[in-house]
């Protein structure tokens, strides 16, 4: 598996630095790939506030403030949970801009939540927006890599638009 795009990560950091934004991540199915890719770039500490790998629902609730009611109503792989993850990361890590990722990297999935479905959210200034991307059954490593790259692209677009 090739890893997430380090050049994209460097561009995210440069854009965030130029906009004077601090960054945070809340990752589930990517297991910290976005944070690892950002912090692999020298000098990232002036922009990167931190990240939370919230693989279990208990950690989503305890560390990110995702409500149990949201998890029960929508499941962990949902835009609603992604929104609460991003808002929680931004608030709890003191970051200006946060991205969250929750999905089904595979193998597996179901008819209602297939392998390759990943929900993302971006939070800034107490407001968040979410989207779902269907990467398809590309295999666990490829879904995770593409999800990490997509999260970096979302951060870049938001940082450049600030």
Image (cartoon, rainbow, N blue to C red):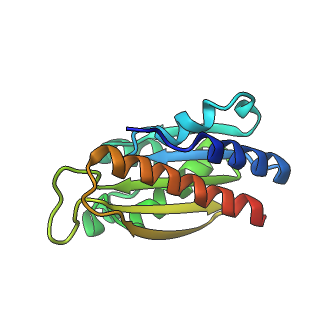
Q: Position of residue 4 (x, y in %)?
A: 50, 43
Q: Can residue 73 be seen in this view?
A: yes
**Where, quadrant-wise, is the C terminus in this rendering?**
bottom right
How many numbered discs, if any?
Answer: 0
Residue 146: image x %, image y %?
A: 43, 53
Is the residue 25 above or below the residue 101 in the image?
A: above
What's the residue at 59%, 58% (across, down)? Answer: 153
Q: In this view, does 16 lie to the left or right of 153?
A: right
Q: In which quadrant of the rendered view does residue 66 lie?
A: bottom left
Left/right of residue 162 with respect to residue 56 in the rendered view:
right
Does 114 appear above or below 98? below
Can residue 125 be seen in this snapshot?
no
**Image vertical order of residue 102 relative to residue 73, above or below:** above
Report the residue at 73% width, 39% height from top: 47
Left or right: residue 34 versus residue 105 is right
Residue 63, position as x, y percentages in the image: 45, 42
Image quadrant for the N terminus? Answer: top left
């Amino acid at each position: 598996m090739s890893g997430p795009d380090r050049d994209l990560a460097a561009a995210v950091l440069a854009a965030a630095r130029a906009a004077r934004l601090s960054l945070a991540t809340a990752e589930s199915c990517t297991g910290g790939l976005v944070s690892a890719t950002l912090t692999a770039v020298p000098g990232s500490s002036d922009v990167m506030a931190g990240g939370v790998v919230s693989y279990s629902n208990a950690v989503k609730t305890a560390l990110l403030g995702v409500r149990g009611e949201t998890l029960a109503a929508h499941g962990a792989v949902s835009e609603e949970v992604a929104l609460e993850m991003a808002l929680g990361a931004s608030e709890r890590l003191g970051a200006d801009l946060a991205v969250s990722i929750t999905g089904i990297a595979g193998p597996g999935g179901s008819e209602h939540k297939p392998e390759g479905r990943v929900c993302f959210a971006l939070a800034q200034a107490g407001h968040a927006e979410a989207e779902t991307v269907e990467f398809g059954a590309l295999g666990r490593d490829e879904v995770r890599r593409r999800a990490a790259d997509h999260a970096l692209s979302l951060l870049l677009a938001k940082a450049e638009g600030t």
